[in-house]
Amino acid sequence: MGFEEIRQQIIDDLDNASATARGILPLYTAGSGARIALVGQAPGRKAEESGVAWDDASGVTLKSWLGVSDEQFRDTNLFTILPMDFYYPGKAATGDAPPRKGFADTWHPRLLELMPDVSLTILIGSYAQKHYLGKRAARNLTETVRGYADYLPEFFPLVHPSPLNFRWQAKNPWFEREVVPALRERVAEALGNGVPAA
C-alpha cells in the first residue's frame, strides 16, 4: 500500500467523516525519502484553514531551532510532518483540545513503514512524548526535554515553539544554550548526504 492509498483511507475513515463532509483534508506531509519525522500535537485552526502545517510564528521558531530553511523544512524527502492527529481538534476550556486518542496508533505506523530512511523523530510537546516515549519519559515535559540525550539517537524531545511559551523559555535558559545547538547538530547529521542545515 502506498501513500495515496493511505491518504484516501484517512479521508474515508468514518472517524473523520465530519471533516471530510466540510471539505477539510488531513494535514500531514510524507515522502519516501524523508529522514526526519516531526511529531507535534495537531493542526491549529489557522493551519487547518491554510492547509499548511507550521505556517505561523511557531513554525518560524521551529525552523530556527532546527537550523533549516523553509525550503528544506517543506521538502518531503527531508522531513515528514506527522502530528498526533491530522485534523484540528477544536477548542477546549484552555487552548486547543487534545489530539484524539488512537489516531496516531492507527496511522503513524502505516506511514512510517513507507519511510525507511527516517533516523530521527523529533517529539514536540507532551502528547507526542508520552506516545512515543511511554514510561521512558521523565515526570514532566521540562525534565524530558532537559534529558534529551537519554532518548538519542532515535528521539529528540522538544517544548512547543509557540510564542505563548516565552515564560517557559525565560525560566529555562539552558534550553537555548544547550538543547538547541545539540538539536541542530542532530538534524544536520540526519539530513546528511551533503545537505547542510541553514
Image (cartoon, rainbow, N blue to C red):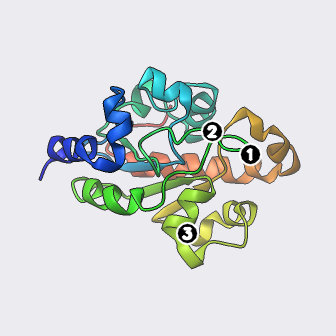
* SS of the residue under disc 2: loop
Which residue corresponds to mark 1?
176
Which residue corresponds to mark 2?
91
Q: Is residue 66 above or below residue 36?
A: above
In the rendering, at what x and y percent does residue 100 appear? 48, 54
Q: Give the mark toward the camera: 1 or 2.
A: 2
The CA distance from mark 1 to mark 3 is 19 Å
* Residue type at the position of mark 3: Tyr
Dot 1 or dot 2: first in sequence order is 2
In the rendering, at what x and y percent does residue 101 appear? 48, 60
Q: Is residue 198 above or below residue 183?
A: above
Q: Are marks 1 and 2 in contact (CB under 8 Å)?
A: no
Neighbour tally class for label 1: few under 14, some 14-19, many 20 plus, Cα within 10 Å: few
* Residue type at the position of mark 1: Glu
The CA distance from mark 1 to mark 2 is 30 Å
Neighbour tally class for label 2: few under 14, some 14-19, many 20 plus, Cα within 10 Å: few
The CA distance from mark 2 to mark 3 is 32 Å
In the rendering, at what x and y percent does residue 60 appear? 59, 28
* Front residue of this view, candidates 106 and 31: 106
* Residue type at the position of mark 2: Lys
Q: Which mark is residue 135?
A: none
* Front residue of this view, candidates 36 and 135: 135
Neighbour tally class for label 3: few under 14, some 14-19, many 20 plus, Cα within 10 Å: some
Dot 1 or dot 3: first in sequence order is 3
Side of 160 where 47 appears, left or right: left
In the rendering, at what x and y percent does residue 125 appear? 62, 53
| Residue at point 11%, 53% (across, down) | 1
